[in-house]
């Protein structure tokens, strides 16, 4: 059976004072998850752990994201996290702080039959 994307959620998160890219990314994941109410698994009696979950994190300094910590925010599935350049840093030169804004895209995939589901 081919793997098909069944879910796409987007989120943003920030760390206003600590310049913590992982914290901003985790908050972005939580933002995306709070936009979802996915009854598909319960309705079709599908094991959520069979879901393949791919998370892309966009931040200005992707090398500072702890991808394992971000993956731990996802409650189900086989999760991989990839950090890449994106997001936004807002510098406050007067107070010498940087606010970090992260964006995430969470895609979930399942092995589904080729034939269309009929309702």
Image (spheres, helix red, strand yellow):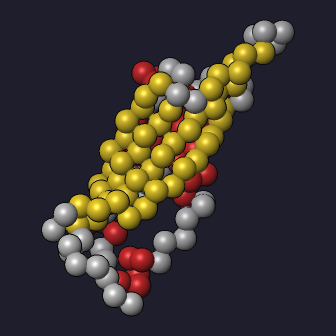
| Image position, residue 82 (x, y; %) | 37, 36
Q: Residue at x 84, y 9 (%)?
A: 94
| Image position, residue 35 (x, y; %) | 60, 61
Q: Residue at x 65, y 35 (%)?
A: 14
| Image position, residue 46 (x, y; %) | 31, 77
Check the picture and name the quadrant holding the N terminus: bottom left
Q: Nearer the viewer, residue 76 or 84?
A: 84
* 106 on left or right of 34: left
Query: Does the rendering let one see residue 30?
Result: no
Q: Is residue 50 above or below residue 102?
A: below
* 75 on left or right of 18: left
Number of marks present in the image shown: 0
* 116 on left or right of 22: left
Q: Is residue 74 above or below residue 96?
A: below
| Image position, residue 41 (x, y; %) | 38, 76
Kindly indicate the quadrant of the structure image that contains residue 21.
top right
Q: Is residue 96 above or below residue 116?
A: above
Query: Does the rendering let one see residue 86?
Result: yes
In this view, the residue farthest toward the left is 1
Q: Is residue 17 above or below residue 82?
A: above
In this view, the residue farthest toward the bottom is 119
Q: Residue at x 58, y 34 (%)?
A: 102
Q: Nearer the viewer, residue 89 or 2?
A: 2
Check the picture and name the quadrant holding the C terminus: bottom left
Q: Residue at x 63, y 40 (%)?
A: 13
Kindly indicate the quadrant of the structure image that contains residue 5.
bottom left
């Amino acid at each position: 059976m081919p793997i098909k994307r069944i879910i796409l959620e987007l989120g943003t998160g920030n760390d206003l004072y600590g310049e913590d890219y992982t914290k901003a990314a985790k908050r972005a994941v939580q933002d995306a998850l709070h936009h979802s109410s996915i009854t598909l698994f319960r309705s079709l009696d599908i094991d959520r752990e069979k879901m393949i979950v791919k998370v892309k994190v966009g931040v200005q300094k992707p090398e500072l994201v702890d991808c394992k910590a971000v993956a731990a925010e996802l409650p189900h599935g086989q999760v991989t996290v990839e950090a890449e350049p994106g997001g936004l840093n807002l510098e406050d030169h007067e107070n010498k702080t940087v606010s970090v804004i992260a964006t995430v895209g969470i895609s979930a995939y399942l092995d589904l039959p080729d034939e269309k589901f009929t309702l």
